């Protein structure tokens, strides 16, 4: 598992996190882990940049598939759009 923290340069506050991990039974896949953006910073493209960063990292690692767990909870509707 590897995790990364996005920090606001002006305030020094954590504004988001992302992670990537692999399962031994799926060597060609990477999983998104602990992906979140602070509510105050949502809607500013930070989530897209974090997700792009994590996908790029998976590609550099030679992974052919990128997976995540999500739900159809209405509170996650914006995340669903981002993931698609």
Image: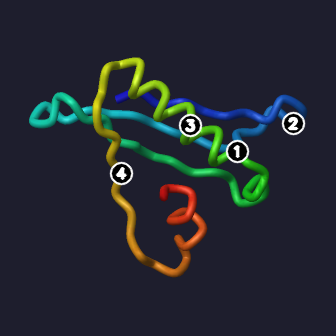
Packing grade of label 2 (10 A; few <14, some 14-19, many >=20) is: few
Closer to us: mark 2 or mark 3? Answer: 3
Question: Gap in Å between the C-alphas at discs 4 and 3?
Answer: 14 Å
4 and 1 marks in contact (CB < 8 Å): no
The quarter holding residue 20 reads top left
At x 71%, y 44%, the residue is 15
Of the image marks 2 and 4, the number of the one nearer the N terminus? 2
Q: Secondary structure at mark 1?
A: helix
Position in image of residue 14 (x %, y %) = 70, 39
Packing grade of label 4 (10 A; few <14, some 14-19, many >=20) is: few
At x 34%, y 29%, the residue is 1
Position in image of residue 3 (x %, y %) = 47, 31
Q: Residue furthest bottom?
A: 74
Position in image of residue 36 (x %, y %) = 57, 51
Question: Gap in Å between the C-alphas at discs 2 and 3?
Answer: 24 Å
Q: Which mark is residue 4?
A: none
Seen in the picture, residue 5 relative to 44 is either above or below; the reply is above
According to the picture, the residue beneath numbered tag 1 turns out to be 46
At x 71%, y 60%, the residue is 39
According to the picture, the residue beneath numbered tag 4 turns out to be 68
């Amino acid at each position: 598992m590897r995790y990364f923290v996005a920090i606001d340069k002006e305030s020094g506050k954590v504004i988001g996190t992302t992670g990537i991990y692999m399962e031994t039974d799926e060597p060609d896949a990477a999983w998104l882990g602990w992906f979140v953006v602070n509510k105050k910073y949502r809607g500013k493209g930070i989530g897209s940049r974090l997700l792009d960063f994590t996908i790029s990292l998976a590609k550099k690692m030679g992974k052919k598939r990128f997976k995540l767990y999500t739900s159809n909870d209405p509170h996650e509707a914006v995340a669903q759009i981002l993931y698609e």
